[in-house]
Amino acid sequence: MSDSNLPPQPPQGWEDNQPTTPMPPVPPASPVPTTAQTQVIPPAPPAGGQFGAQQPFGGSAQPPFGGAPAQPPFGGAPGQPAFGGAPGQQPYGSAPGTPGFGGQNNAGGFGGNGMPPYGGPGNSGDSNKKNLMWIIIAAVASLAIAGAAIWAFTAGPFAAKDDKETTADDNGGSDKDADKDADKDKDADKDKDKPKADSAPGAVQAFLDALAEGDVKTANSYLEKKIDSAFADQKVVDAALKAAPITDIEVEGTDDYNITGTFMVGEEEISMDFSVRKSGKNYKISEYTLGQFSVTDELAKLQPLINGQEVELKASDSYAFPIQYEFTSANDRIAFEGTTVFIPYDYSTSLWDLEFALTTEADTAIRDAVRKSLESCIAEKTLVSSCGMDVPATLDGGETVEDGTVTRTLDDSEWRGVDSMDLDFDYDNPLLITTWESFYPELTATCTDTSGQTGLCDIWSFGGSKSPVIDISGDDLVVKWE
């Protein structure tokens, strides 16, 4: 049913006074027969092309978007009654002379209340713009949420991980990460080859292998108490393995207290019994089963080179690795004699057998230094001398000795004593050489007796020298008389 009294509606989505392109006419549909009284809708003013300007649900047929003439109501085909109505009945919600849905006058369309239809003159242009703005905001927010969800489940934290994500080209990884993974694999392979300390023989094998590689830190990790003396210095161990490497390692035994390790140190075969005890999940070797050195105080004071390396040796240093140790002098005036190379592997190895002596050159130089000092001493004229050949100012008979007039003379037998005296290392400090030798010169001086007469006199009872002590620690020899 069409109402010719309604003004033509502008196309939806367009503002007033905008040119429109006419749509081709649609053939008219067959009118729907009805016996109900036609409800006349007051003409609505132009809605400015607002979205949704159409005939209320169940009302008189209005042309849809595009201007098509009278179409049947929703749900009705041509020649059929309106949706929900039987033939000859008023369309749903608009019985004549009765209120609309909800008890209100339905003149305004579906829902009554006298309100204009949706999209009708009751809605302004500003309201529709606001609605359109909120629709756009909601759409953008929905797209953002959807995009975030897609990212989270494809490339984000919830994305499924591929086991092959280690290559740079396929999954965006870097070459550096691939190299790190390769290094980890290599380290893992090396660890597979290393013996484990989860058994007593395994601990001994791991200890000897680490020692053969010169890895002091790892070797110490298999000991109950690590060795931190001069004998475990990394330089000393490196030099030892260079001179006499550890090879042909074999470990036998299952009893924790009876593990035997056999190996070569250079050309010498070594067999050691190790005591191993469980410590947590792993096993540790008792340091008491390792070789020990008995370091003398005299040797510690000499500070020898160990395997040619300068290290601080203490008298308290004892435990050592089963490697080769060679002791040499750090002072070129001293030569080590006797046994100088040791491999400590069986209880305590005493270093008393390590002897040292002055070199021939040092012996000669020391005697020359003593002679020179003695010559300087006897040349002095004072009562008090530098070598201890002192003369008292008053003699036993009451004579007085004039200072600056003393003459000291050594005969040949005394000078020969310089060449024959014993040179010993001082017990407290082996870098000092003692002689225990004294020299007695002939003494003369100007004296005045008790009667007041002055003249040359011989002095017999005084003037024996002190013993020379020679310090050999420095570049130059120093002679002192004590």
Image (spheres, helix red, strand yellow):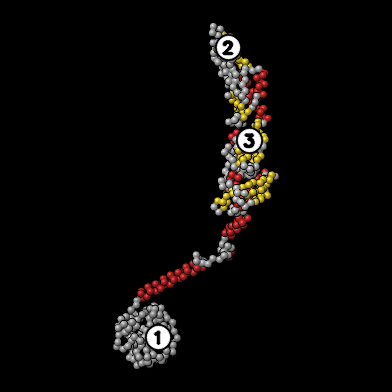
Q: Give residue 373's position: percent from left, percent from top.
A: 62, 23
- Residue 352 disc label: 3
Q: Residues within 10 Å of mark 3 (few under 14, many from 20)?
A: few
Q: Secondary structure at mark 1?
A: loop
- Residue 446 disc label: 2
- Residue visible at 61% across and 16% down in the picture: 408
- Residue visible at 67% across and 24% down in the picture: 420
Residue type at numbered disc 2: Thr
Q: Residues within 10 Å of mark 1 (few under 14, many from 20)?
A: few
- Residue visible at 33% across and 79% down in the picture: 122
- Residue 315 disc label: none
Foreground: 349 or 60?
349
Residue type at numbered disc 3: Trp
Q: Which residue is mark 1?
A: 74
Work out which quarter of the rendered image holds the C terminus and state it: top right
Residue type at numbered disc 1: Phe
Q: In the image, is residue 61 above or below residue 423?
A: below
Q: Secondary structure at mark 2?
A: strand
Q: How many marks?
A: 3
